[in-house]
Each structure stands twice: as structure tokens, then as C-alpha cells.
Image: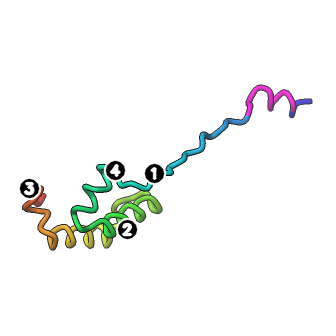
Amino acid sequence: MAGKEEKAANPPTKVPEIVDDDDEPDDWDKRIFSTGCAAEQMKMNDCYYQKRDWRSCKLEMEAFRECWKRQGNDERTETKNA
């Protein structure tokens, strides 16, 4: 009986289904693609998602930084070296 009581007290949570059927790029996508470094950013974000620590993604961050400079985004966005 304890099993039924426990289920009644803690019903399973329904997770809402995320439906993204919009194939059109949104403003964020357009802005990222306009940098010319979308592939490098995706790799950098994927690395962080997997490792949950930016310090473990130094190679991906450096590749993104180099792409950013090659594409001239420093001047376009007034990026400053820290």
C-alpha cells in the first residue's frame, strides 16, 4: 500500500513538449550568422554544454576569438581586449 500512497502524494511531473517547427532564422540567428563565426560559436557552446566549465573549452574559445578577428568583428562591434 505504501507504493500507492507515495504515488498519490508525488504524482509524476509532465514535461512540456518543445516544438520548434519554425525554419526561419530569428534575429539572434541572423546576428550570429552575420559575424561569419557561427560554426566556431556552435563548437564553443557545445563544449560548454558538455563540460559545464569554460576553462575546459580554451581551444574552442581561442578558435572563436581568432575567427572574430579575421572577420573584422573587433572594429564592427568595438571589441576591447581585456
Q: Are marks 1 and 4 in contact (CB under 8 Å)?
A: yes
Q: Would you call the spot at circle 4 few (<14 residues within 10 Å), some (14-19), or many (20 or more)?
A: few
Q: CA distance from mark 3 to mark 4?
A: 24 Å
Counting residues from the start of the chain, the first of labels 2 and 1 encountered is: 1
Seen at 76% across and 26% down, the residue is: 9
Q: Name the residue nearer the viewer: 13 or 26.
A: 26
Q: CA distance from mark 3 to mark 2?
A: 24 Å
Counting residues from the start of the chain, the first of labels 1 and 3 encountered is: 1
Mark 2, residue position = 43
Mark 1, residue position = 22
Q: Given the image, on which type of amino acid does mark 4 rest?
A: Asp
Residue 81 lies, in percent from the top left, at: 11, 60
Q: Would you call the spot at circle 2 few (<14 residues within 10 Å), some (14-19), or many (20 or more)?
A: some
Left or right: 11 in relation to 64: right
Verify whether residue 3 appears in magenta.
no
Please report the bounds of the magenta region as a residue range: 4-11
Mark 3, residue position = 78
Mark 4, residue position = 26
Dominant SS in magenta: helix
